[in-house]
Image: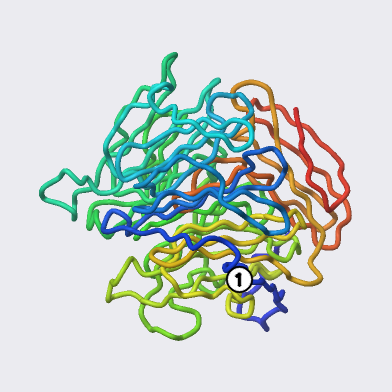
């Protein structure tokens, strides 16, 4: 689909002109606040908790309580009754007990929590009832996968707050929790290098792996990004083709960008944002600088100091069949070495595979201290809208009003058994333009995730063939007309 081998320095191709309407004034003034323990985090979860096919929004609050916004349609949101939870750094929705309702894993500076979901967005604290080991730690990353009827949980911890020699070189170990008949059994996943994002997904070798992105700011030296082989139960090394990379890792975004069935991976950082391109031999290569994804400095020229990237997400904003990239940016707090007013990025992908900055023209280049975010179709019109959580500044909501967008499909999966949402599946959508694919995962981003249909832009195509490679190894194919949400089963 995309001709990445064309020279990037030829005449620049035409770039789509996305446009967003700022609706931030229509939602409550919600801010992610707190001291040192909330310099990081600030995630947002997007999921449908009442079965009306309109996704709700759950935002972490840090020292403030979490906020659940019910979706009333037409980009109208109103607060919904929700347990009072402070200390939250983020949340991920997933069906942990296989009852069909989405539950919530709440990340906290303190003991984490599990909320069991029910009808009409009712949630109950079942942390102790479900046997989650209680650990008073600083949780900043999460992912999960299924090897049986119940999920395995990977929980990432930041600095060990109890270490008197910290914070530098005092990174805590991470936790790997395997399901048991009465709950989960915890064991240390170490060494830990101050994890800020985790993602369990198939890697460039097409094997299930746990990727961990770590903050060099606190491990200082001797640490690096990590890949843990889920099947072999060990970290990959250079002998496996895994090259150690050290960066100020904040968030992970993963998606197949060139239709070869292997996911590229974006790692946000302080300074360069690193895009790793999956290779046919199962390794990764850094994207060429001319590809336009490094987003090193504030794009508006307001500051010559490096940017600080947090949440990253691929999504086809104009539905032309080419995934674009949003990056939430913001200073840690008052770090003088980095840009203080650091506008968020929207990088649109061109047919040659290069990316081009359009955030200012699109109307979303705010310069608060952004943290978590989500590109999601919140009003069901087939265009990806945007929600952004800011540190010590109001949350932002934007409606995608891009004119003349292409066609689209949204694909939701259901299957029997404990893994009701088919976590681990891959969805491939093929039109006359070519193929594009997405994995169904839990994790990544920065401190927040989504459990909503996977969105595919189709460009001019009015129909597509959808192939689903299910977690059990079986496959199905479905022909579908464009511009609809489909729920598929094996």
Q: Quadrant of the N terminus?
A: bottom right
Q: Is residue 244 visible?
A: no
126 and 294: which is toward the camera: 126
Residue 175 percent location from the top left of the image: 34, 34
Residue 25 percent location from the top left of the image: 57, 69
Residue wearing tag 1: 355
Give the colour scheme of this rendering.
Answer: rainbow
Q: Is residue 439 visible?
A: yes
Q: Is residue 372 left or right of residue 54?
A: left
The crowding category of the residue bearing disc 1, from other C-alpha atoms within 10 Å (few below 14, some 14 to 19, many at least 20), is many
Residue at screen point 79% across, 55% down: 408
Residue at screen point 40% across, 72% down: 307
Q: Is residue 354 above or below residue 190?
A: below
424 and 165: which is toward the camera: 165
Q: Which element carries disc 1, helix, strand or loop?
A: strand
Residue at screen point 52% across, 54% down: 253
Q: Residue furthest bottom?
A: 301
Instruction: Quadrant for residue 310, please give it.
Output: bottom left
Residue at screen point 46% across, 75% down: 367
Residue 476 percent location from the top left of the image: 78, 32
Q: Quadrant of the C terminus?
A: top right
Q: Is residue 125 left or right of residue 469?
A: left
Residue 151 percent location from the top left of the image: 50, 27
Q: Is residue 105 left or right of residue 246?
A: right
321 and 361: which is toward the camera: 361
Instruction: Quadrant for residue 361, please give it.
Output: bottom right
């Amino acid at each position: 689909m995309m001709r990445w081998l064309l020279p990037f320095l030829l005449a620049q191709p035409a770039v789509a002109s996305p446009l967003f309407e700022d609706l931030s004034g229509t939602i409550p003034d919600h801010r992610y606040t707190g001291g040192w323990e909330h310099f990081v985090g600030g995630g947002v979860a997007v999921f449908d908790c009442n079965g009306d096919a309109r996704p709700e929004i759950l935002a972490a609050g840090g020292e403030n309580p979490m906020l659940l916004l019910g979706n009333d349609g037409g980009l109208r949101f109103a607060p919904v009754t929700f347990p009072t939870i402070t200390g939250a750094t983020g949340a991920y929705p997933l069906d942990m007990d296989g009852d069909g309702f989405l539950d919530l894993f709440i990340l906290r500076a303190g003991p984490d929590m599990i909320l069991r979901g029910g009808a009409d967005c009712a949630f109950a604290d079942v942390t102790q009832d479900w046997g989650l080991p209680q650990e008073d730690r600083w949780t900043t990353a999460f992912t999960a996968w299924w090897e049986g009827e119940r999920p395995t949980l990977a929980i990432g911890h930041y600095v060990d707050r109890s270490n008197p020699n910290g914070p530098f070189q005092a990174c805590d170990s991470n936790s790997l929790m395997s399901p048991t008949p009465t709950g989960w059994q915890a064991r240390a996943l170490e060494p830990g290098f101050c994890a800020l994002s985790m993602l369990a997904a198939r890697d460039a070798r097409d094997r299930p792996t746990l990727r961990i992105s770590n903050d060099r700011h606190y491990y200082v030296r001797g640490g690096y990004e990590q890949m843990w082989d889920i099947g072999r139960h060990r970290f990959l090394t250079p002998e496996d083709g895994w090259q150690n990379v050290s960066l100020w890792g904040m968030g992970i975004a993963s998606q197949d960008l060139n239709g070869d069935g292997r996911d590229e991976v974006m790692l946000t950082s302080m300074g360069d944002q690193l895009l790793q391109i999956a290779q046919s031999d199962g390794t990764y290569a850094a994207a060429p600088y001319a590809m336009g994804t490094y987003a090193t400095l504030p794009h508006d020229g307001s500051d010559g100091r490096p940017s600080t990237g947090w949440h990253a997400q691929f999504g086809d904003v104009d539905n032309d069949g080419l995934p674009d990239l949003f990056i939430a940016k913001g200073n840690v707090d008052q770090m003088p070495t980095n840009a203080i007013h650091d506008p968020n990025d929207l990088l649109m992908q061109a047919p040659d595979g290069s990316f081009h900055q359009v955030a200012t023209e699109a109307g979303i280049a705010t310069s608060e201290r952004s943290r978590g975010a989500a590109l999601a179709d919140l009003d069901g019109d087939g265009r990806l809208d945007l929600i952004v959580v800011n540190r010590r500044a109001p949350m932002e909501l934007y409606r995608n009003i891009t004119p003349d967008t292409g066609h689209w499909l949204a694909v939701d999966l259901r299957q029997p058994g404990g893994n009701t949402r088919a976590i681990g599946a891959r969805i491939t959508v093929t039109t006359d333009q070519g193929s594009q694919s997405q994995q169904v995962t839990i994790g990544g981003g920065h401190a927040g995730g989504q459990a909503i249909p996977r969105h595919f832009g189709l460009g001019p195509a009015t129909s597509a063939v959808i192939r689903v490679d299910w977690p059990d190894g079986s496959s199905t194919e479905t022909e579908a007309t464009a511009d609809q949400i489909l729920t598929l089963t094996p």
